[in-house]
Image (spheres, helix red, strand yellow):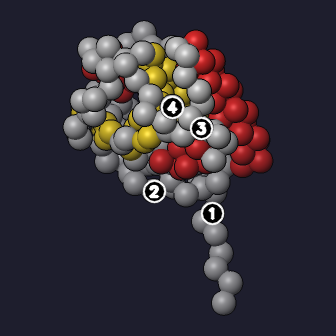
Amino acid sequence: MAVKFLETPGQVLIHRDQIASRIAELGNEIAHDLVVDLEAEGLGADASDRVVLLPVLTGAIIFTADLVRHMPLNLSMRMVTVSSYPGASKMSKGAKLRSELPTDLEGMHVIVLDDILDTGQTLGLLHDMISEQNPASIRICVLLDKQGVDRKHPVKADYVGFEIPAAFVVGCGLDHDGLYRNLPDIVALDG
């Protein structure tokens, strides 16, 4: 029996093929920059104890899974959970840490991965907390950078997959009330 995939709940803004291509580019770019940093410290690309990816759950899980396949480095991954869009809300309610932040980031090259840069509250909170641990570097990588929004925290991503207009989007890990994360495209949610 054939199973029909979900009906798209709005207009496709970014097609899955574009997403896959851009994620491959991002992985290569990040890996290159990390190798440059490690070599500047006299280390090689196999210095696995110095690179930490920190995906923000749950939204960044699909983006992270796709991205790491394009990063030919030894690295570790820690997860952190932050909530800002509870339930069916389409407006950020402020970032709240929902899990423990790793406490062993001193001297590490940390890449924070998130699905979207919107108000900047989530990434601002994490950047400030990670900075207190004196990492070797902190970089922020987002799949989407929403333009034309009021940034509550002046955060700038070091790596951006796509800039999008000020629309509420789902797909590729982004959800609305827990739904649509598994859509393969980035879709502007109707209504």
Q: Give the Cα distance between marks 3 and 1.
A: 37 Å
Q: Earlier in the sequence, mark 2 or mark 4?
A: 4
Give the numbered dot on residue 73.
Answer: 3
Q: In terms of sequence position, does the residue under pointer 1 or pointer 4 come before the other?
A: 1
Q: Percent x, y for residue 38?
A: 55, 20
Which quadrant would residue 107 be assigned to in this image? top left
- Relative to 13, does residue 93 appear above or below in the rendering? above
The secondary structure type at the circle numbered 3 is: loop
Q: Is residue 162 visible?
A: no
Say left or right for 83 vs 45: left
The label nearer to you, 2 versus 4, is 4
The residue drawn where x is 43% and y is 41% is 77
- Label placed on residue 51: none
Which residue is under mark 4?
Answer: 47
| Residue position marked by numbered label 2 in the rendering | 179
Q: Looking at the image, is mark 3 or mark 1 earlier in the sequence?
A: 1
Residue 176 vertical placement versus 169 (above, below): below
Q: Are marks 2 and 1 in contact (CB under 8 Å)?
A: no
Q: Which residue is mark 1?
A: 7
Among the two numbered marks 3 and 4 on one chain, the one whose residue lies closer to the N terminus: 4
- Between the C-alphas of marks 3 and 4, the distance is 8 Å
x%, y% of residue 4?
65, 75
